[in-house]
Image (tube, grey):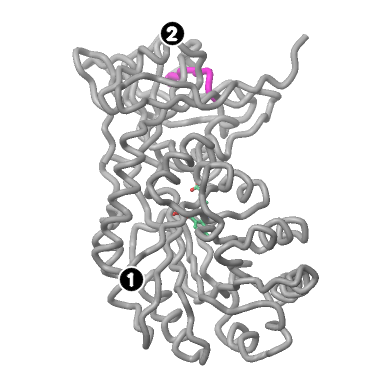
Amino acid sequence: MRTIHYKDKKLFFENYKIENAVNSFPTPFYLYSKQKLINNFLSFQQTAKEYFDMPEICFALKANSNLELLKILSSQGSGADIVSGGELIRAINAGISPKKIVFSGVGKTKDEINLALDRDIMSFNVESAEELMLINKLAKHKNKVANIALRINPKVKALTHKYISTGYKTHKFGLLEKDLLGIVNDDTFWTSSKLVGLSVHIGSQLTCLEATKKAIQQISDCANKISTKLEFIDVGGGLGVNYSNDQKPKAPTLNEYMIAIRDNLKVNYPLKIVFEPGRSIIASTGVFVSKVLRSKQSEDCHFIIVDGGMNDFARPSLYQAYHEIYPSKDCNQKIETDIVGPICETADCFGEKRMLPKLKEDDFIVIADTGAYGHSMSSNYNLRSKPIELLINNDHSLIQIRDKQNLETL
Ligand code: LLP
């Protein structure tokens, strides 16, 4: 649940007065709550434990790869779902044991595979026969045995934005069941590789569990057709969050999500369940704060121009994603406002036709639930430096956990 509220007309995030951060650091910035991150992780873990023996929670680094935040997750026992050599190094630097790292992605390079082989990671989640051939060959060169979880493509259409739906046959991800079983039964793939699991991930920001249920049934059927006893089933990530105050349908609760998995997982023997959540853990732990530069009126269109842009926070421009936007001051007199950034594209818009008070220079806005796929997707487009990141500690002190990284100086 989001905890942004007004107290004495001032905006608070997790009981921290946001104005304090605005007065001390350059905007725009991301602001995270340590306590909320810990709470979110622990509730995911504890709920999983109510339904499964020894679940492994491998946080998806792509959602947020800030080193300090990962150290917090690591200290709570998180593993990692990674998709690049960079993320592998980051996870290890955050203190996450390679024994808790799964490596997903369709395009692993030789260098990345070698790096992961050297660290003896928990598993390569393999997405094609060609990839497995390469891993097997590289493992052989190193006299090692690679742990493999084959990713199934269950041919289900997950109800979400089409860019982040990944479980249908037209998507590049995973192996169709017949191809997967063909690989399992072909000894040439397994000379230096060992099948330890199956994995599935059908998409992100899932607010309906029907496709998830079908995918879990399929992965169970598939596991039961394999004579090798698997160590784990990796059910991927994808659990959605409520971005809008009146979002319909509402995202499933953790209990509903776990029940959907438990009730549809029918493997003939006990095995470990691995989860790869990203958004459901970290989205609500962060906000994006941006100062108003000026306002502008074009006939009946009212704009406020803020100092953050689509390079800093891309979700609205990339996926037409809705995020709640809170003005630094609240009053009853409101006008329909478009909140736009400085970048030379009409897509550089955080919210259209939002009812906001008239804001002026140095007021600020707070975009909610930007902890996931916020900073991790930011870029230097327009030669802008990336936003800094700040963390609210449990004692309400504030620390900077990423620099501005200016691109060049005169
Ligand atoms: N595992 C795999 C294999 C994935 O591809 C992903 C996300 C996850 C786990 C984590 O999914 P989550 O629990 O966060 O939904 N940039 C997009 C989201 C891209 C998701 C890509 N894969 C956005 O801002 O909505």
Report the mark closest to the observer, 1 or 2.
Answer: 1
Q: Main secondary structure of the magenta part?
A: strand
Q: Where is residue 233 in the image (x, y as percent from the top left)?
A: 45, 73
> What is the quadrant of the N terminus in the image?
top left
Q: Give the range drawn in magenta.
A: 300-308
Q: What element carries label 2?
A: loop
Residue 327, position in %: x, y? 34, 20
Which type of secondary structure does the marked residue at label 1 adopt? helix
Q: In which quarter of the image is the C terminus?
A: top right
Q: In this view, does 338 lie to the left or right of 61?
A: left
**Residue at image mark 1:** 261
Mark 1–mark 2 Cα distance, whole angstroms, equals 48 Å
Q: Quadrant of residue 398?
A: top left
Q: Where on the picture, by quarter, is residue 18?
A: top left
Front-most of 211 and 111? 111
Q: On the rendered structure, is 48 left or right of 320?
A: left
Q: Image point 26% across, 58% down: which residue?
A: 47
Pick the residue in front: 275 or 313.
Answer: 275
